[in-house]
Image: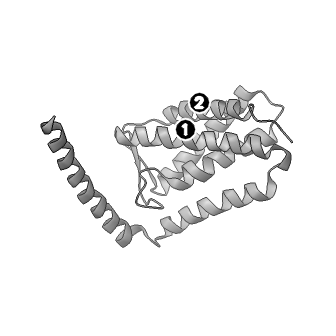
Amino acid sequence: MDRYLDSTKKLEDQLLNVHQYKLDIWKEYVLFDWHWWFAVLFSIIPITLWIKYHNKNLTVKLLLAGLTSVVLSVFLDTTFIFFGMYDYHYEFLPIASNYIPWNFFIIPVLIMFTIQLFYKFNVYLKGVILSLFVSFIGLPLLKIIGVFYMIDWHYFYSFVAMYIIFVLSYQMSKIAKSK
């Protein structure tokens, strides 16, 4: 057991050094760079649009779907980053390995608006269309501007992950009662 504790202590020390180095790089190269300002706008605009245009009668349902999508997308993103499948550059905050605007604002707002605006459409068709848009338009745009970096990843994997996130978020939204 002592070897385990010694090993984890060494790992913690190395992680602290890596985190400090990451913070130094972030302060020098990312903070206030145009990529950082893009992330700020990428966070503010979607949530502002949602606050202004969401259906107030569906607020609880939509927020439940949005929260579910945040939890799932952060979990999947963190897992895929941990295993070296892709990475994000120009993080909004250096403390997160995932791209905060994407996981906390873009994905949830897209899901909430998709649920709201296409309420009568088949849920699985909505999931396919949204997943195609996010995976084959959204992520390639993030890649073009240098935010999303693919290592051992294909856009189809994102399609599958996004589809699962959408369907589970939609199913969670159904447990809430409308006003």
Q: Residue 93: in sight, yes or no?
A: yes
Mark 2 vs 1: CB contact within 8 A: yes
Residue at 67% from the left image edge and 61% from the top image edge: 45
Residue at 72% from the left image edge and 33% from the top image edge: 126
Q: Is residue 156 left or right of residue 30?
A: right
Mark 1 sits on what residue?
72
Task: Indicate the quadrant containing the N terminus: top left, top right, bottom left or bottom right.
Answer: top left
Going by the picture, which residue comes out furthest to the left? 3
Q: Nearer the viewer, mark 2 or mark 1?
A: 1
Badge 2: how crowded within 10 Å, few (<14), some, or many (20+)?
A: some
Q: Is residue 69 left or right of residue 62?
A: left
State the scheme by which the image is colored: one colour
From the viewer's side, name the closer residue of 23 and 138.
23
- The amino acid beneath tag 2 is Ile
On the image, the x and y values in percent for residue 68 come to: 62, 39
Q: Is residue 110 left or right of residue 14?
A: right
| Label 2 to label 1: alpha-carbon separation | 9 Å
- The amino acid beneath tag 1 is Leu
On the image, the x and y values in percent for residue 106 come to: 62, 51
Vertical order, 41 against 155 (above or below) = below
Mark 2 sits on what residue?
164
